[in-house]
Amino acid sequence: MTSRGHRGGVIAAVLALGMLAPRVHAAALGSGGWLFDPDYVRSYVGLRYGQSLYADSRISPLLKIADNSGNDAYNAVLGLDLSRYLGLELALNYLEGDITGEGFGKLGEQTVYTIVPQVRLRYPLRDGRLVPYLVGGVGFGISEFSDGTFEAVNRPDAVIPTSRETSTAGTLGTGLEYYLAPNLSLDLEAKYIFFSATTETKRGRVPPQNVPDPPQPVPGVGEPGPRQDLNLDNIVFSAGFRMYFPQAGAADQFQGVRWPSAGEDGKRGYLALRVGGWWLQSGKEFTPGFLASDNEKQQLTSGSLGFNWNRYLGAELAVDYYEFEVNAADGGFKVNEHSVWAFLGQLRARYPLWNDRIVPYAVAGLGAGFTEPNDSTPEGHLTRMPSGQDWSLAWAAGAGVDWMVARNIALEAEAKYLSIHPDVGVEGRFQRPRTRQSGKVDSLLFSVGVRVFFP
């Protein structure tokens, strides 16, 4: 899954760009209500997550999608509403699916990125609070293959994409926004993504008859295969939110609901979403005989759901996710990747400053975490390797800062130390049944994102 690391940087860049966009003006309507003024340009950023379905599960004559029941889809947009009915936005889409051939298992993963300027036609209803819309545009896309499997390398009847392709991409879709406040809306969208590309391929090789113990790294795949025209059209269903950047005070009230400031006493719920990077801190040994290493992605995905009890203290449920590589100590080659999940109950101590616009905080928590293997390499399949989902106690401590860009939205940055020490299952060709070995994964996590508060 080498390409997943790019999407965190894309989302972070969109959030940063959104801070530079023009402000939105709102006009009062009745008691406590708001109506967007159609005479002013307003800017926004949006984040969505959903599921994608390939329009045709057979993406080429020799390749098809292994499971077309739904694949992860991520979307970020940076846009401007030019008037009450017309807007422009730049949409970034990320799609990924496992691919296979006839009569054998997964060959690897095919990833698609698209960057498409879009026109957005809007029709506000209910005083502008409910907004159906249409979007469409033309841009470009990138397709690449990654994480080739044992079957991809060791079957002469397999063909494997070998290159990164760039081609024209298009979008056409519809959606619905529901405004929680003049600067914040929930968003549902269905969109068709048009994208095709042509790729070079290579064939798998005839597997070796004699494998040394320990095995040597498996050489690359064999002879060139036929060119394949890939049909990567997708239908994407997603949900998320848009954040607008209004003038100061515009989001304080909406339909009679008042948002408190960051420094006021009283309970206040929130949802935080972050992306970032991680660095191993526990040395090179993951478990005896296997080394843990940073990988080229270094991507962290993090989130929390919580509430502030008062001006200084709160609690939250935090989730952190990242992946690292596992290498064989006696051969130096990669055997697989391991995912790390942590689920923590955290206390959050806060100290609002600068008229409650800047809020430094510290967090500490305890919970459970697990490591789980994925994307085993051809070398890994020929030897023993860590396998299975392994749970253990997890703890974390760190600090961060919220920057309140509105009373109900904060941009944030956070650094946190996470410790997980699971007992790891190890099994494979030269050792059955599975054995248990002590393991450790301590990492420093750094992330940036957004915290959205509830009234």
Image (spheres, grey):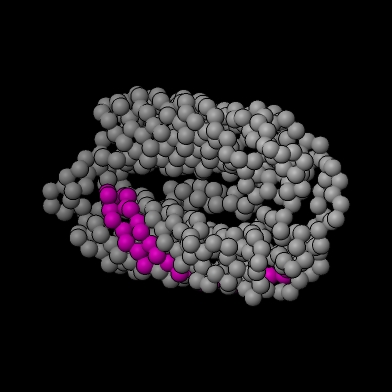
Total label count?
Answer: 0
* Image x and y of residue 185, in percent: 32, 53
In magenta, the rendered stretch is 174-201
Residue 302, compared with residue 141, is above or below; it is above
**How would you classify the magenta stretch by its main secondary structure?**
strand
In the image, residue 74 lies at what x, y percent?
A: 48, 55
The stretch drawn in magenta includes residue 239: no
In x, y percent, where is residue 333? 78, 44
Asked if residue 121 lies left or right of residue 328, the reply is left
Q: Nearer the viewer, residue 284 or 75?
A: 284
Q: Is residue 411 visible?
A: no
Residue located 28% across and 56% down the image: 178
Q: Quadrant of the C terminus?
A: top left
Residue 35 found in image quarter: bottom left
Please identify the residue farthest to the front as the structure is shown: 433
Q: Quadrant of residue 355?
A: top left
> Looking at the image, which residue sits at the far left?
31
Q: Residue at x 29, y 34 (%)?
A: 268
**Residue at the location (46% across, 59% down)?**
51
Is residue 30 shown left or right of residue 14? left
Residue 178 painted magenta: yes
Q: Nearer the viewer, residue 224 or 25?
A: 224
Q: Position of residue 269 (x, y in %)?
A: 31, 36
Q: As drawn, is 91 to the left or to the right of 437?
A: left
Can you see residue 279? Answer: yes
